[in-house]
């Protein structure tokens, strides 16, 4: 177990490394310099600034500086918000995004898992068709359609919920639902497929043959085996939820990291865009790692 | 020349046999798909959307970019010729939805084609070559898979400017990973079939075996994933356009229209609702057809 964990940890290093290199190359292959502005700059000032940001050094030295800074979690200063470091912006924005994303993931699991199991048990009957059609609708309605429509009905026409911003818990209801529906649908479908497969396996027949109660068969034997694909979906799922929160925060005017990202992208705030990409990248790689290790621990068939 | 004629006549004979009621995989799958009412309905609906998007703009006296300040926020009506109403500068939403649909569908299809070519080549090569090459190639896919690609695409668009070609390339470069994995898995099974061994014994080289014997047999699974990749790509493009990073005005796409509609929804809700319906229905149809195809080609779950 320990050796497997260490092996996976070491395996994540090249991934992080490639992430860093790709982002570095992107920035340096991009046309123009971050110092370009509408008004031409005196050559001396430009040279000084270039020296300050190490832009006058050969590429490999810049790469070295870049790695060193990121290794110390220093993403530099924002171009757009003067006097604010990217680190500060991440520190203010991320907790908000984490709350929205975390609740959305939770909601997706809490509803998706039971729904998928129900559909599997009632395979090819009404409940199954209803759950499957529902989940196809869920997959086909993107959050940037669902979000505005919810605002229109629940906030503009009826004034039941606040349309945006952050205040009380009411502000979280619509964003969390908008973000969650698509993943709820995915989880339902995954859970249905895996439950159907598990229900057919010999160990379930054995459990029934032993005379176990149907409830015991279901919760002790079927559930732990059927939930494994959902566990492995958590890695890509979390990545998708972080991405989705970019648009959901935009719709609902939530001051999270995703919103910073979009404004930064539209304003070409290079350091902020880069910092957030790296930060999210590292989080996603880390989350995948945790999920992999968890999976190995939960699935007795995985050998190290 | 003689060889070519011979192989052609063999193919014709095989086709004739199939037409006489042989149970080829394709025929079987088509029969099962036809029995799937939801998938067939989706197919018809999708064809309808495609037709509308293609010929729709010619049915209207308006175009997608002309502004008309006498017709701002007109509600949908048949009398005025603005079937879907107009937006905040008086542009006709019907024509905009149709031309936007052209872009959304085109991005979906062209990009899926790019990812198809890369994914099938990569996956088939990795699976067929096997051994060390395979593990290195798939390890690379694993690494790419765990990168936050959406953010990379946004970075690309920010740094290199927003144009349609870059959008194709960027999304295509992202979406081949799934295809490569699936194709590789399937290739591993096909590789051990006797007819591959026979081909090798007959002196066929690697390239020929992959192109002539492996890729054609991947067709079933590839068709399923193509139908499932198209909606993903359309969604991806809409997502970028919604954020203002995709298609640039005056051109438009469903995502960009939904973005416009969101800011106008309290005064002109049709601007949000109509493009949303088109996008959702299209995605829904593709997903339903993909699901139906999967069931039809691999009936063990139903």
Image: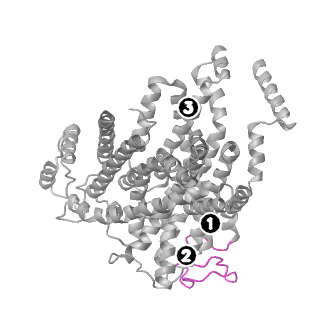
Q: How many other residues sit within 10 Å of disc 3, few (<14), some (14-19) or many (≥20)?
A: many
Within the magenta stretch, is there residue A39?
Answer: no
Residue at the disc numbered 1 = B98
Labelled pair 3, 1 in contact (Cβ < 8 Å): no
Which of the two marks, 1 or 2, is nearer to us in this view? 2
Which of the two marks, 3 or 1, is nearer to us in this view? 3
Residue at the disc numbered 2 = B271
Q: Are marks 3 and 1 on the same chain?
A: yes
Horizontal and vertical percent position of residue B286: 63, 55
Q: Residue at x 46, y 59 (%)?
A: A109
Within the magenta stretch, is there residue B64?
Answer: yes
Direction from residue A109 to residue A29 in the image, left or right:
left
Horizontal and vertical percent position of residue B157: 40, 54
The vertical placement of B297 against B185, above or below, is below
Residue at the disc numbered 3 = B124
Horizontal and vertical percent position of residue A25: 31, 43
Which of the two marks, 2 or 3, is nearer to us in this view? 3
Direction from residue A76 to residue A151 in the image, left or right:
right
The vertical placement of B54 against A225, above or below, is below
Q: CA distance from mark 1 to mark 2?
A: 13 Å
Q: CA distance from mark 3 to mark 1?
A: 38 Å
Residue interval drawn in magenta: B60-87
Please tell me which residue lies in front, A62 or B118. B118
- The mark that comes first in sequence, 1 or 2, is 1
Q: Main secondary structure of the magenta part?
A: loop
Residue A17 seen in the figure? yes
* Quarter of the view holding residue B75: bottom right
């Amino acid at each position: 177990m320990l050796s497997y964990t260490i092996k996976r940890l070491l395996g994540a290093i090249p991934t992080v490394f490639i992430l860093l290199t790709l982002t570095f190359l992107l920035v340096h292959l991009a046309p123009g310099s971050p110092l370009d502005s509408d008004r031409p700059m005196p050559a001396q000032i430009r040279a000084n600034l270039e020296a300050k940001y190490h832009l006058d050094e050969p590429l490999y030295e810049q790469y070295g500086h870049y790695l060193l800074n990121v290794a110390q979690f220093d993403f530099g200063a924002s171009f757009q918000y003067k006097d604010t470091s990217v680190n500060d912006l991440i520190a203010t924005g991320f907790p908000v995004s984490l709350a929205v994303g975390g609740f959305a993931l939770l909601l997706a699991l809490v509803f998706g898992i039971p729904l998928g199991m129900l559909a599997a048990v009632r395979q090819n009957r009404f409940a199954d068709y209803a759950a499957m059609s529902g989940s196809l609708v869920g997959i086909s309605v993107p959050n940037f359609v669902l979000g505005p429509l919810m605002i229109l009905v629940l906030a503009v026409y009826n004034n039941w919920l606040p349309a945006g911003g952050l205040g009380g818990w009411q502000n979280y209801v619509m964003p969390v639902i908008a973000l969650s529906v698509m993943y709820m649908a995915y989880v339902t479908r995954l859970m249905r497929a895996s439950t159907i497969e598990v229900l057919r396996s010999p160990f379930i027949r054995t459990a029934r043959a032993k005379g176990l109660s149907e409830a015991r068969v279901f919760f002790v034997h079927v559930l732990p085996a059927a939930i494994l694909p959902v566990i492995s979906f958590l890695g890509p799922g979390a990545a998708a939820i972080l991405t989705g929160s970019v648009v959901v925060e935009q719709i609902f005017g939530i001051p999270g990291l995703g919103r910073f990202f979009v404004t930064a992208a539209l304003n070409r705030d290079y350091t902020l865009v880069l910092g957030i990409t790296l930060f999210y990248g590292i989080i996603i790689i880390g989350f995948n790692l945790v999920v992999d290790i968890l999976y190995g621990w939960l699935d007795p068939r995985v050998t190290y | 020349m003689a060889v070519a004629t011979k192989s052609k006549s063999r193919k014709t004979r095989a086709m004739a046999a199939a037409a006489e009621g042989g149970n080829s995989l394709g025929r079987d799958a088509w029969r099962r798909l036809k029995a799937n009412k939801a998938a067939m309905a989706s197919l018809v609906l999708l064809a309808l959307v495609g037709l509308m998007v293609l010929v729709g703009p010619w049915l209207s006296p308006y175009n997608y970019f002309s502004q008309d300040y006498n017709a701002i926020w007109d509600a949908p009506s048949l009398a005025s010729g603005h079937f879907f109403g107009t937006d905040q500068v008086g542009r006709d939403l019907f024509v905009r939805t149709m031309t936007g649909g052209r872009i959304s569908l085109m991005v979906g299809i062209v990009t899926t084609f790019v990812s198809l070519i890369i994914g099938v080549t990569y996956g088939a090569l990795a699976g067929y070559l096997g051994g060390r090459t395979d593990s290195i190639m798939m390890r690379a896919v694993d690494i790419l898979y765990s990168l936050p690609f959406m953010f990379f695409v946004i970075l690309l668009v920010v740094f290199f400017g927003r144009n349609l070609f870059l959008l194709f390339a960027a999304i295509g470069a992202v979406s081949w990973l799934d295809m490569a994995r699936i194709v590789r898995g399937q290739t591993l099974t096909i590789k051990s079939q006797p007819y591959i061994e026979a081909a090798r014994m007959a002196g066929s080289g690697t390239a020929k075996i992959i192109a002539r014997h492996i890729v054609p047999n991947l067709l079933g699974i590839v068709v399923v994933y193509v139908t499932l990749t198209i909606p993903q790509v359309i969604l991806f493009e809409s997502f970028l356009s919604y954020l203002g990073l995709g298609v640039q005005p005056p051109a438009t796409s469903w995502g960009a229209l939904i973005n416009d509609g969101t800011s106008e929804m309290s005064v002109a809700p049709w601007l949000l609702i109509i493009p949303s319906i088109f996008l959702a229905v299209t995605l829904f149809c593709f997903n339903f057809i993909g699901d139906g195809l999967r069931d039809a080609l691999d009936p063990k779950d139903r």
